[in-house]
Amino acid sequence: TNDILDQLPLNGKSVLITAGPTYEALDPVRFIGNHSSGKMGFEIAKSAANLGAKVTLVSGPTHQNIDHNHVTLKPVVSAQEMYNEVHKHFKDSDIAILSAAVADYRPKKVADKKIKKKDSTFTIELEKTKDILKSLGEAKSDQFLVGFALETNNELENAKGKLRSKNLDLIVLNSLQDKGAGFGVSTNKVTFITSTDEVIEHELKSKTEVAHDLMQQILKQLHA
Ligand code: CTP
Ligand code: CA
């Protein structure tokens, strides 16, 4: 056909993306969450869609908006909901990019009524959530799998460890060293590490540009 989209590099490809935080309920009105804005994941979704991909964007609660013909937003709240939604789509995906800031622990018991204040101290017992990215690394056949790593020390070593233990093709190391990087800001300082141990450092850039760089890196590895 003459469709202009036929000429885009990700035409006919399905891309699965996670974004935002997860909220882990404590009772009907309270949760444990984090400061992830979702901006990075939403920018990646736009970037992939602009390259012709069909995008499924599984996102925890954010204030981000997206209006793109090729992006389907699947809103979730908890880590378990994100896990379930991601596994619905993974088999039919060509590329999965997991940028969500998933809670590592959730309250072991969720009260069905609002917890009343009582003693001067209060202890919450937490249990581990499932590692969504790791589960995809175990389930993957020929999907290209990308993870993120947020590190404050031993950055490269820790990121390489995650790349291996989660069976990834590429990991994006997020440096919190820099003031304009990370949560709640529109810039990010990232380093890409590939499964063949190539390390590609980038300058502090807008999240839009980081998303673009990431998609170019994925295309490069797919065509290698
Ligand atoms: N991740 C996930 N599910 C989880 C925890 C993390 O899918 N339950 C994904 C994140 O989306 C990210 C990658 O795993 O792509 C790394 O997340 P990060 O928090 O940096 O590492 P963890 O493996 O959780 O280890 P830690 O927090 O102890 O450094
Ligand atoms: Ca974590």
Image (cartoon, rainbow, N blue to C red):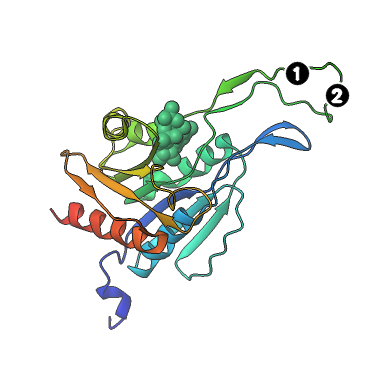
User: Where does label 2 land, which residue?
Assistant: 117
| Label 1–label 2 contact, CB within 8 A | yes
User: Crowdedness of circle 1 by 10 Å Cα count: few (<14), some, many (20+)?
Assistant: few
Residue 122's label in the rendered image is 1
Q: Nearer the viewer, residue 70 or 126?
A: 126
Residue 15 position in % (x across, y down): 38, 55
Quadrant (top left/top right/bottom left/bottom right) for the N terminus: bottom left
Vertical relation: 30 (above or below) 38 = above
Q: Is mark 1 within 8 Å of ligand 2?
A: no
Residue 108 appears left or right of 105: right
- Element carrying mark 1: loop
Quadrant housing residue 46: bottom left
How far apart are the two marked residues, 1 and 2, measured between alpha carbons?
A: 9 Å
Residue 153's label in the rendered image is none
The residue depicted at 26 percent of the width and 30 percent of the height is 157
Q: Nearer the viewer, residue 183 or 220?
A: 183
Vertical relation: 73 (above or below) 82 = below
Which three-letter amino acid code belongs to the residue tagged 1? Phe
Q: Nearer the viewer, residue 8 or 208?
A: 208
Which three-letter amino acid code belongs to the residue tagged 2? Lys
Quadrant housing residue 136: top left
The residue depicted at 69 percent of the width and 35 percent of the height is 31
- Element carrying mark 2: loop
Does residue 123 show up? yes
